[in-house]
Image (spheres, grey):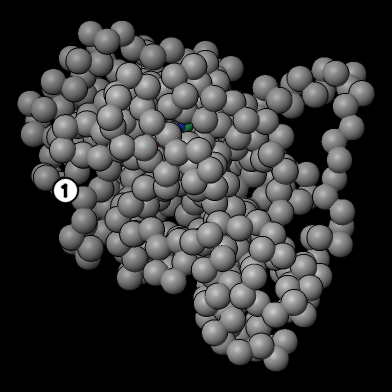
């Protein structure tokens, strides 16, 4: 039987520093009689030096380092498994949280292309499991465990940031291209629904955006949502220039309701109105994700309906066509010809679109698949 060691319970009572904004850390230190400038020093160690151990914070007095080790932690989690795709452009980790819950995070590496430089994008989980039950999604089929804390969200990004710092990535077959040693983008497209965990997600994005800390521009962050209308409206009022992606996946209420139960609560008319208002308030483009499911939502008729639905948003809408990653559910991606036809029809309607290159199939890339596989393996061993 496989025994999974648990994180000792005393660690769980510590304050996770990765969940604190700089002012919050200042406050936490002030309560312990420490001056505010110590917070900046600690932030610098956490987010610039990417350290994982208080003893490495050499400009802090020894007494403070000892106290931090007793009362605080730096994103405690255990990496249960790390898989690299054959081309090493996709890396996936399975993380065990302090309470034993399992989540996944993915690093996607993109070589430089034309004018654009190389990218290192982390796909982050925001919940353990998900409450929304989309039929094509491995996470949706697990059900909901719990929200992640802001620190647990930040820790996923830092894990890959440390990995790239220690071993910068150079695109194979591109001699002379500059190694990439830092995270350039974050997408909240891992397990869970970010806007269902609104406060912790926004807190995490603010921490990662902080110029004194990780300093990643909000325009390099993307929030993907199943379409929680009231939360989209709230997001439009935040002074944070993050990108918004809407999981649309069907052009009619009838079809969307079959694969995405949330459509019964927020039908397309309400969702599109919220997107229109979001565009009007922020002046920003919205991406619509469309997972292509062969024989379900990929017919020319669907492309025409989608074109008509989005044409009123004009240049503010972009469709990202995503051939479905096969999960245990019985969905298949369309043929390349069917994808081409679908996209051409969208262009005819004046709707800009692209297709997401499939990646990491050999490492169970659709979020939730690795955890599902891992649990099956552990369970069968334990039987
Ligand atoms: N809950 C959020 C974000 C996480 S899912 C949302 O639904 O938007 C991130 C994206 O992956 C979503 O667009 C989701 O629909 C898509 N997705 C889920 N299962 C998939 C699969 N099997 N193949 C391809 N994309 C999938
Ligand atoms: Fe949840 Fe997003 Fe998966 Fe739907 S697609 S079940 S909202 S994680």
Left or right of 10, for residue 96: left
Give the side of residue 119 with respect to residue 340, left or right.
right
State which quarter of the image contains the C terminus.
top right
Q: Quadrant of residue 26?
A: bottom right
Q: Position of residue 197 (x, y in %)?
A: 55, 56
User: Tag 1, which secondary structure?
Assistant: helix
Quadrant that contains the N terminus: top right
Report the residue at 85% width, 36% height from top: 4
* Occupied quadrant, residue 9: bottom right
In the depicted structure, whether residue 178 falls above or below residue 212: above
Q: Is mark 1 within 8 Å of ligand 1?
A: no
35 or 337: which is nearer to us?
35
Residue at x-position 13% and y-position 22%? 345
For the image, the number of numbered tags is 1
- The reply to whether residue 199 is in sight is no
Q: Position of residue 95 (x, y in %)?
A: 67, 40
Is there any visible trace of residue 42 in the rendered image?
yes
Q: Position of residue 83 (x, y in %)?
A: 59, 26
The answer to whether 179 is drawn above or below residue 194 in the figure is: above
Q: Position of residue 210 (x, y in %)?
A: 43, 68
Q: Is residue 338 left or right of residue 147?
A: left
* Mark 1 lies on residue: 316
Q: Nearer the viewer, residue 187 or 88?
A: 88
In this view of the protein, which residue sits in the foreground, 342 or 219?
219
Picture residue at 65% right of the left edge, 56% below the top: 52
């Amino acid at each position: 039987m496989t025994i999974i060691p648990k994180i000792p319970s005393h660690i769980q009572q510590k304050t996770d520093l990765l969940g604190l904004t700089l002012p919050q850390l200042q406050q936490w230190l002030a309560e312990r009689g420490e001056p505010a400038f110590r917070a900046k020093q600690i932030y610098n160690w956490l987010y610039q030096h990417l350290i994982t151990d208080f003893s490495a914070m050499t400009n802090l007095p020894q007494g403070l380092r000892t106290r931090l080790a007793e009362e605080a932690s730096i994103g405690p989690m255990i990496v249960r498994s790390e898989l690299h795709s054959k081309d090493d452009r996709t890396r996936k980790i399975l993380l065990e949280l302090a309470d034993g819950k399992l989540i996944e995070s993915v690093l996607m590496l993109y070589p430089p292309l034309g004018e654009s430089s190389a990218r290192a994008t982390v796909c982050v989980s925001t919940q353990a499991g998900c409450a929304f039950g989309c039929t094509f999604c491995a996470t949706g089929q697990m059900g909901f465990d719990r929200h992640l804390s802001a620190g647990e969200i930040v820790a996923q990004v830092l894990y890959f940031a440390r990995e790239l710092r220690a071993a910068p990535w150079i695109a194979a077959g591109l001699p002379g291209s500059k190694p990439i040693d830092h995270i350039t983008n974050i997408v909240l497209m891992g397990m869970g629904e970010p806007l269902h965990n609104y406060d912790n997600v926004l807190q995490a994005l603010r921490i990662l955006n902080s110029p004194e800390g990780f300093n990643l521009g909000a325009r390099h962050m993307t929030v993907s949502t199943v379409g929680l209308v009231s939360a989209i409206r709230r997001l439009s009022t935040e002074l944070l220039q993050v990108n918004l992606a809407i999981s649309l996946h069907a052009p009619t209420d009838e079809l969307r309701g079959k694969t995405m139960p949330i459509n019964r609560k927020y039908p397309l008319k309400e969702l599109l109105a919220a997107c229109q208002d979001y565009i009007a308030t922020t002046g920003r483009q919205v991406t619509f994700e469309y997972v292509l499911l062969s024989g379900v939502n990929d017919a020319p008729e669907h492309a025409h309906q989608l074109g008509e639905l989005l044409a009123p948003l004009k240049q503010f809408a972009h469709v990202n066509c995503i051939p479905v990653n096969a999960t245990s559910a019985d969905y298949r991606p369309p043929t390349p010809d069917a994808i081409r036809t679908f996209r051409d029809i969208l262009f005819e309607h004046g709707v800009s679109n692209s297709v997401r290159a499939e990646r990491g199939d050999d490492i169970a890339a659709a979020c939730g698949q690795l955890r599902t596989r891992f649990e099956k393996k552990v369970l069968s061993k334990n039987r």
